Amino acid sequence: MIVELGPDHRYDCTHRSLVMGILNRTPDSFWDRGRFWDFDDFLRLAEAHVADGADFLDVGGSKAGPGPEVTEAEEMDRVVPAVAALSARFDLPIAVDTFRGSVADAAMEAGASVGNDISGFADPTFLPACARHGAAVVATHVRIGPRIPDPTPSYVDVVAEVREFLAERVRWAKDARIPDERIIVDAGLDLGKTPEMSTELLRRSDDLARLGHPILLSASNKGFLGEVTDSGLEDRVEASWAAHALGIAGGCRILRAHDVRGARRVADVMAEVMA
């Protein structure tokens, strides 16, 4: 499987899995709670991710879950200078984690080459912006929408419904003239899913792999792992490693991770075993 993260970064992921290092430009992310909000701290974390083996970096200025409103201008101020700084420092692809086409467009002008959209392309300007820049895109399943509480999610068949949603978004991306190798899908674990639903989606990653597009696995430190292991937020490292390995075995080829060093080691071991 070939993965292109924009026009200048092409990877053979037949066995290899890529590691995406998470970088939050938010004061209220579920994981770091603003620990890297200071720009110097943010850059130091980026340097650590690169040193630990990240293949690319993911910058987000608005968390996925409910919280105070983040205006378009605020998100721009958080994301665009960060992308510009990273692009100047590292010869790696940069993803922008946003559901606004305008923010994606501005971030790509600053050097981003991947649009990571947790809304499933709800903004009709998102895909055209990515296509203009030759960027890759990530289509994520979410039941209602980002930043909207969803306390009682319900599906007839969660795997089938997520697969059909993502298949439709793949068609949208193709209609926007984005090449197959630049279309990535993400099941959206914990986004409008109970822990049991997220566990089922991870277990059946191979069903999503049949879509024929790279799967991004965003399981790192997620709530469903806490339920499975009865562990708090700060104690899900090993559970995240296990999820990474299970995802790769099921066909996932991109690991979105807070612990880049651990994810890199899992990915390298799995590549060696599967080669």
Image: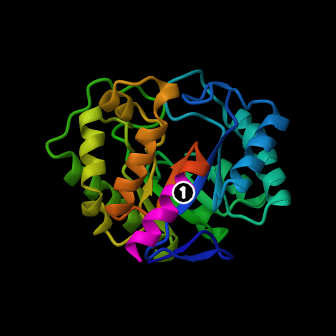
Q: Residue at x 40, y 25 (%)?
A: 231
Q: Circle 1 is placed at which residue position?
A: 265
Compared across the picture, whether 178 is left or right of 62 comes to left
Say if 54 sits above or below 147 in the image: below
Asked if residue 163 lies in the magenta stretch, the reply is no
Compared across the picture, whether 246 is left or right of 99 comes to left
Q: Residue at x 60, y 63 (%)?
A: 130
Disc 1 marks a residue whose amino acid type is Arg
Locate residue 80, reporting x and y percent. Answer: 77, 47
Locate residue 36, reporting x and y percent. Answer: 73, 32
Q: Nearer the viewer, residue 20 or 145?
A: 20
Residue 125 visible (yes or no): no
Please identify the dominant SS of the magenta region: helix
Locate residue 204, reporting x and y percent. Answer: 24, 55
Q: Which residues are magenta?
A: 263-275
Q: The N terminus lies in which quarter of the figure?
A: bottom left
Q: Mark 1 Cα within 10 Å, few/some/many (few <14, many 20+)?
A: some
Q: Nearer the viewer, residue 42 or 139?
A: 42
Q: The C terminus lies in which quarter of the figure?
A: bottom left
